[in-house]
Amino acid sequence: MNKKTKRKIAWLIILLLLLGMLIPRFLKNKKQHISIEQPISFEEIENLKYKQKFLGGEKKAKDKIAVIKIMGEIIESEGGYYRRNLVEDIISQLNQAKNDQDVKCIILRISSPGGTVVAAEKLYEKLLEVKKEKKIVSLLEGIATSGAYYIAVTGDKIVAYPSTITGSIGAIFTLPNSQKLMEDKLGIKMITIKSGKYKDIGSPFRSMSKTERKILQDIINSASREFLNIVTSNRKIPESKLPIISDARIFSAEEAQKIGLIDEIGSMNKAIEIAKEIAKLKEAKVMEYYYKPTIFDFLLSSHVKKISLNNIPKLPETGLKYIWLPGENLYGE
């Protein structure tokens, strides 16, 4: 058998596999009178079934402690074909834990610098909903700052590793400025025709006026006050410590514990111990959710990745964020 024949057979097998994946889905959709092109509803996305992986504890125990990971920047941009965005993934897992009568407590494994304000707010509201039925322990790993801490305060207890960096309670608005590059280096000047004086506020093609800076600063201050209110309403922070956390500084785990931002310093074992204690469990199996993609998912994901423009370098996304983002010091200190 020559190479050309082998290649044809390989492509035929791939085609048959794809048809084997697509035909059952088509028949299912047709039976339910749903068009293949109809977008999946948010409810359907939320209820995606996750598999469970045993991590520790008593394997034969009926009661469960569910571990849900919140890793990386908390944003809602799409991942690959079978990977929804981070917020959808977490909400889906929280729904599964909420509906599982054997799950008595949830451990949030958080390692994130934060993310967009809206993404953090969505997860915060969902966690408050779940908290009405399940106990929650937040475990801070590595960096758990800003929007990540915003989410963590929903925990009945917060545990942090000794080397964890947390805090950065506040908002930030990132705006690129390419005026000098465009005009001085490239000789390009942008002309903007607008309907209102502040329609192009934050434009990267010109300098910002004092009034425009104040408008944006007011938005940031409002979001920061909301963040501070969330922290103080969920944590018993002494009034004397409020000035320290309101300037958006970061803290070591030891400093955070003294202020009242966290309860305990420890690892996953400490978090499991506390989870059992607050859920009043003598024994429990610790499970972690994961999604196992099909062959079809992998094939299409690989294809989409090749034709996507995600790997082209681009400027940081503009917008209001709860994120620790070291950068230019605008306060002159």
Image (cartoon, rainbow, N blue to C red):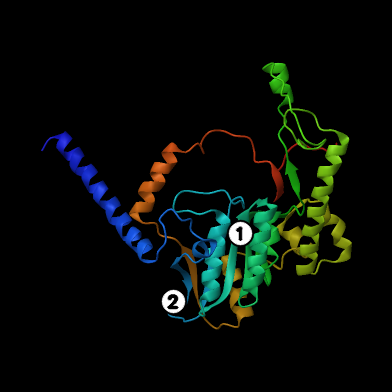
Considering the numbered disc 2 on the image, is that residue within a helix, a strand or a loop? loop
Q: Which mark is residue 59?
A: 2
Q: Give the vertical position of 188 relative to 123 (above or below).
A: above
Q: Quadrant of residue 145?
A: bottom right
Please tell me which residue lies in front, 149 or 221: 221
Looking at the image, residue 325 sits to the left or right of residue 102; the answer is: right
Q: Quadrant of the C terminus?
A: top right
Q: Quadrant of the N terminus?
A: top left
Q: Which residue is mark 1?
A: 110
The answer to whether residue 6 of the structure is visible from this angle is: yes
What amino acid type should be assigned to the residue bearing mark 2? Lys
Packing grade of label 1 (10 A; few <14, some 14-19, many >=20) is many
What amino acid type should be assigned to the residue bearing mark 1? Ile
Whole-angstrom CA distance, mark 1 to mark 2, is 24 Å
* Picture coordinates of residue 149, whole percent (x, y): 69, 59
Considering the numbered disc 1 on the image, is that residue within a helix, a strand or a loop? strand
Name of the residue lying farthest toward the left: 1
Please report whichever mark, 1 or 2, sits nearer to the chain's N-terminal start.
2
Q: Give the vertical position of 313 relative to 162 (above or below).
A: above
Looking at the image, residue 81 sits to the left or right of residue 113; the answer is: left
Looking at the image, residue 124 sits to the left or right of residue 80; the answer is: right
Residue at horizontal 46 percent and vertical 81 percent from the top: 61
